[in-house]
Amino acid sequence: MAKILMKGNEAVAEAAIRAGCRLYFAYPITPQSELIEYMARMMPKVNGTFLQAESEVSAINMVYGAAGCGKRVMTSSSSPGVSLKMEGISYIAGAQLPAVIINVQRGGPGLGDIQPAQGDYFQATKGGGHGDYRLIVLAPASVQEFADMASEAFELADKYRNPVMILADGMLGQMMEPVEFKAPKTDEEIAELWKQHKDWCIQPNEDGDAKHHHEINSLEIDPLMLEKHVNKIYAKYAEIEKNEIRYEEYNISDDNEILCVAWGTASRIVKSAINELKKAGKSIGLIRPINVWPYPYEAVAKAIGPKVKQVYVFELNTGQMLDDVKIGVNGKVPVKFWGKVGGVVFTPAEIQAKLEECF
Amino acid sequence: MEIIATRPETLTKTPFTYCPGCLHGVAHRLIAEAIQEEGLINSMCGVAPVGCSVFAYKFFNFDMAEAAHGRAPAVATGMKRARPEMHVFTYQGDGDLAAIGTAEIVHAANRGEKISVFFVNNAIYGMTGGQMAPTTLPDMKTTTSPYGRNTDDIGFPIRVCELLDTLVAPYYIERVSLLSPAEIIKAKKAVSKAIKYNKEGRGFTFIEFVSTCPTNWGVDPVKSRDWAKENMLPFFKPGLFRDKGEGV
């Protein structure tokens, strides 16, 4: 299929529809407006549900209800709206429901601004909602990857019965790049998807006397029962940590003198700086976590070559991934951080200058 | 021996966990009977709230979801949109529906979601131990209005049926009372109508039950009903607000 030039927000929406998403509930917010607008235009054409909810709180609870029926369902928002969804995300994780949430991050805290930022890393990877739970978090670095992650997110959500977040930013949402889409699932394929959840989800009773009674629920009032429930969820998370670590190695070699770690939009800018410095004979490697939970701690450790004297973390925040990198590096070499906040995006020249200071 | 009354199949065998004299059991029973009578046991699903009836998902004998506080109408919306072939209801108390969930109920009603909402109004938060509700009457004492509800400070109780009756979309809105056997029989008729309209996919149906909370009001069950008749019914007047099926 030929490539199409598209904004990230629209590309991920199209890819979600192709992946069999037929239910989408959301509330307008910049810079993800093109996503909700694309869904408003396209969902009726595939007999899907587009519903503009009265709030992000309602939207995520609509997702909870639809996911409880075993159907592929998605919501999207940007940082302040995602904060509002955190209540529902905790319930979705607690009730072990498959759902996809897209965060097109903007500057924060509070109302912040509407420019690209990576300030929701803590919220996405360390909690955000209450209680012991984890989100699987995919962090795209291009419009193509953003689109590809839609189907990956649904597959992971279905496989592990856990909410999956695609943690993009205003740059990826607004930027246009060529995208190649996967063939859409057929109506017949989509109609069968929910059946993988037949043994637990809400559905009409077609079993005659062997009537099911399924409960979509995160409440366990008996502490010993809740303990068991949370431990069961965490056993699942151990599996996810084993199976779903994804990262990109860029220019990694034994000649590296610096190892960079960056994710999403920031990683692209770091790559440009690495390429420039390569021309000057300086060898710098990059680890780009593609999934930021589970985190590629071992990949970071392994990428520290014999000549690496510095690990450098670059993010569009105040250093939210820094702790994870330090866990991976485990004191072997010094770890430095530099970032920009407030929706201000650093340039390749600025990164280059920071790296040159290390030689 | 002839059995003339028995537990409807639409209720599980799990015993209710409500306080002595509580009317949740009566409300559950009316809804369960209506679902059974309409033959919807295999296609019905419901949403339980946060509050005393938080365990309603254990009592109704079909698929149920437990919602976050106030969010039941949004959860029910997701369920109905995901499974239009099924019939969906929510069961909610006054704190849940008329305080934290005000946005969800108003907008579900305004969209004309094809769901039924059963709203139990006993003028107090029961499960958390008797705090002031959005429906607590003026001067009524609760653990968070220990000197009585001061309307200058916190305003007046919210009449939800009247509020929803300002919207265009709702199909059927009625307030009934559970305070006497005669009124329970009337309530049953309203519940049956809501479930029938739900079966027929007519639109948003809403039943408010005026109820009691002997435990948190600190009175015995009989006195609680007398108190409610004297104090709640004048403010929350039972009646039909809207029935598009009957042209009302």
Image (cartoon, rainbow, N blue to C red):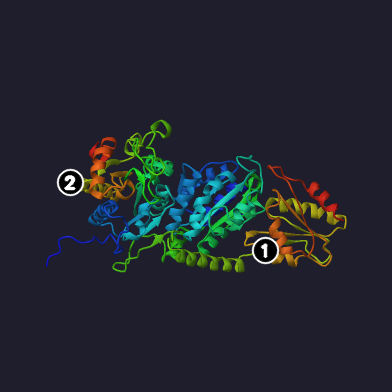
Protein chain holding label 2: B
Tell me how far mark 2 sits from mark 1, CA to CA: 67 Å
Please name the amino acid that badge 2 sits on: Ala
Instruction: Indicate which disc residue A296 carries.
Output: 1
Residue A159: image location, x then y, percent: 52, 65
Residue at numbered disc 2: B182
Residue B6 appears left or right of B136: left
Q: Nearer the viewer, mark 2 or mark 1?
A: 2
Secondary element at tag 1: loop
Residue A97 in sight here? no
Secondary element at tag 2: helix
Q: Could you say which is closer to the camera, residue B98 or residue B44?
A: B98
Please name the amino acid that badge 1 sits on: Pro
Most extreme residue toward the left is: B1
A207, above or below A64, in the image: below
Q: Classify residue A279 by image quadrant.
A: bottom right
Residue B63 in sight here? yes
Protein chain holding label 1: A
Residue A167: image location, x then y, percent: 61, 52
Q: Classify residue A330 by image quadrant.
A: bottom right
Q: Could you say which is closer to the camera, residue A279 or residue B46?
A: B46
Residue at screen point 41% across, 65% down: A198
